Amino acid sequence: MIQIAEHSNDSAIARKSFPRNRSPRHEAVPDALSQMLREGQFSEEHGESQFVPPLVTSCIRQILQLREILELAAIKLSIPHITKEHITRLDEICDDFSSLVEKGYYAGACEADLEFHRKIVSLSGNTLLQHVYHFSNIPLFHQRVGYARVLMKEYTMTDREHRQILDALKARDRAQSERSLRNHIERETHAMLQYYMECL
């Protein structure tokens, strides 16, 4: 795995990403690196090495701002056509999250947390919005939020906030849904920034 703030070159990444017995086509790794460079996941130094930039506070804030914009848009689009089946699935995800936290399965709880937000975005029915959400590194960043949450013991608050969002969706109350989601993301933004400042 390529770590944050790690320097590497094509050959090193190839050795990490592809065991020798898999023998990828020679051009596959440079093509993949070029694509990641275009997506902003790498920066180049001296035209040779690829550098994965550190996750700085300005980047964290911008990712969370983008996440708020996209998820609020998803709620706006989903309210008119949300179904009982959608609500049932969100209920199941919330129950899974609670159960996994209770059992101490925090990695699974982080995945359930991510699934809750993915589901909200998918309910928009807008494939372009879903595409932007996926390729903006929000799901990957969400996993980092989950890691920080283990250290900050914030699972109970996340569980409560998810259910507040769900209750508002059940009532088809767009204003309350948006308010609950915004409060949830603002708290996570503050907690995440605090966590990274303490790690510096």
Image: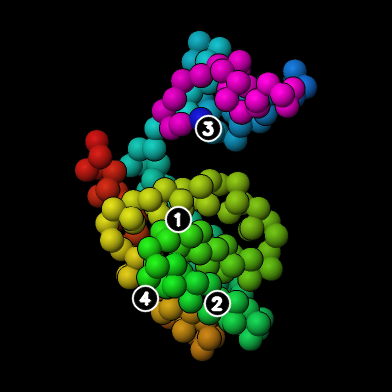
In the figure, is residue 148 to the left or right of 126?
left
- Residue 189 versus residue 9 in the image, above or below: below
Given contact means CB atoms under 8 Å apart, are the residues at marks 4 and 2 in contact? no
Amino acid under disc 3 = Met
Q: Which region of the structure is painted magenta?
A: 3-23
- Residue 102 versus residue 80 in the image, above or below: above
Cα gap from disc 1 to disc 4, whole angstroms: 19 Å
Amino acid under disc 2 = Glu
Given contact means CB atoms under 8 Å apart, are the residues at marks 1 and 3 in contact? no
Crowding around mark 1 (Cα neighbors within 10 Å: few <14, some 14 to 19, many 20+) is some
Q: Can residue 6 be seen here?
A: yes
Which mark, residue 1? 3
Q: In terms of sequence position, does the residue under pointer 4 or pointer 2 come before the other?
A: 2
Residue on which the image places disc 1: 107
Residue on which the image places disc 4: 160
Cα gap from disc 4 to disc 2, whole angstroms: 14 Å
